[in-house]
Image (cartoon, helix red, strand yellow):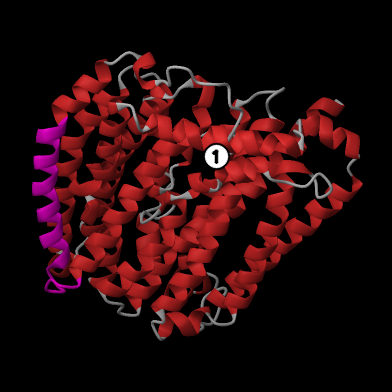
Amino acid sequence: MSVKRSVLIWRILLILILYALQGLIQGFIVSIPLYLASYSASWKEQGTFSWVSYPFSFKILWAPLIDSIYSRRIGGRHRTWLIPVQILIGIILIVLSFYLEFLLVNLQVVTLAIVFFSLCFLIATQDVVVDGWSVLLFTNSNPQWSSTCQSIGEMIGRFISTTVLMTLESAHFTNKYIRQPLSLPHRPYGLFSLQQFTLFWGVAFIIVSIIMIIFTICKNQSNKVNNENIQDVQEIKPKLFQTYLAILKLFKKPCLRQFALILLTFNVGFAATYYMTNLTLVEHGITRDIVALINGPLLVIHIVVPLCMSRIRHPLLWFARGYIPRLFGSIILAIFICFTPQILHTSYYYPILILLLCLNEGLVYIITVSRVGIYARISDPHIASTYMTLLATISNLGQSISSTVVLYLANWLPKLHAYSIEVGICFILGCIWIGFMWRLMTRLDQLPREEWHLTSSPSIPISTSTTHSQANIIEGSVNVIGVNP
């Protein structure tokens, strides 16, 4: 095996591990609401916990700082931030492991929200760093490895912290499907506890950080400077100024303001379906381990849909065309779930539920892939990373707000009917939304690309770390098990 090929394999392994750790925390954040639901948390308490996802909606505010402020002694632009962030995450997880079950059982939601908000902030920062580092490592080989490592790594991490966690931690699942077939005695616990899971991955974060510190110490200083193309400290201030100035200039363009309005509001039509479906299933008596299992087939959708839509030419039109089917998919799924108490124990319930979830998730991904395609199509190549991160940030903010609103609103509705009422309201609002926005989206799709660009955009090599693979969409991992839309 050649040295060049060996180096490439080690780089792929490194980035895969970092993305898997990142996906693990994102999936962990997705799992916590299901644990809260199993302990009879109210919709208001779920709404309080939904605030933890907001750091991903504002990471563009500090992403340029990460690209600009660093120490050469610690290892350059990326390891300066990555090592302390990983250590902090590990420490928080280790400490949290001793208190997590107590906090869940006693519904200490505010404390949980503060802790996981901190974790989400650190993971959003790591997301910025790892994206930039992966782009840099694969620039001279095959840049596609960057996107591939992100997709595979994050999917592995989310799968571990959602499906694997909630099934193997469950005493019911492990007794019925593992211990009983192996003629082992039943136990009142799963293969591992939530404390052991959290502690293990906290230690894993620390170990990865230590390995990176050893690697940094052993790495030749001159090679480090050459490979990472580190800039002089004197360039920091103008670079930051140009970055934030470019963002302000973009908002002066009418087309961008109109598209920002679309991104902020489009989720109004199916917010209840997206953020309340799994929680409602738990309320209807489906255990969290079963919820994790029935969401497993959705992983196939996450692979097939992007491949099928890889060559679309008018993503904004696909976005608009996929909106109405998604509205009807949401209402059909909600109607079926409303009958869960009556048909839960029938032989056809779970097959139909999985089919409807897959159909709904396919429609979700049509819109998601289309939206990412819009970002890539309209972004100014001189500031592409900043442009795409700005658009992704606006979209994430709209979805975070909608999740908080629907969960808090549900607290004011009859508990048994909150889900169906909100899905109906969202359906009506979605029909009104598409009626007003259809012509606008058609007109924006016809604009030439140059209309979206800055008239005189300087070449600003910033925020290569902020987005490179599908604009780092976090929204899909918010409430669907194992998802990365």
Front residue of this view, candidates 169 and 37: 37
Residue receiving disc 1 = 466
Q: Is residue 432 magenta?
A: yes
User: Compared with residue 280, is residue 429 higher up or lower down, i.e. above or below?
Assistant: above
Magenta run includes residue 75: no
Question: From the viewer's perspective, is residue 206 above or below residue 72?
Answer: below
For the N terminus, the image quarter is top right
Magenta span: helix, strand or loop, mainly?
Answer: helix
**Residue 71: horizontal and vertical position, in percent?**
77, 47
The answer to whether residue 114 is left or right of residue 422 is right
Identify the element where label 1 is drawn. Answer: loop
Residue 15 point in image, percent of width and height = 67, 42
- Residue visible at 38% across and 68% down? 49
**Number of numbered tags placed on the structure image:** 1
Foreground pick, 453 / 105: 453
Drawn side of residue 176 relative to residue 191, left or right? left
Question: Along the horizontal axis of the image, is 211 left or right of 293?
Answer: right
Query: Quadrant of the rendered structure where residue 485 is?
Result: top left
Q: Is residue 324 left or right of residue 38?
A: left
Task: Name the residue located 58 percent from the left edge and 21 percent from the top edge.
Answer: 459
Q: State which region is magenta.
A: 411-437
| Disc 1 packing (10 Å; few <14; some 14–19; many ≥20) | many
The image shows residue 260 at horizontal and vertical percentages of 30, 37
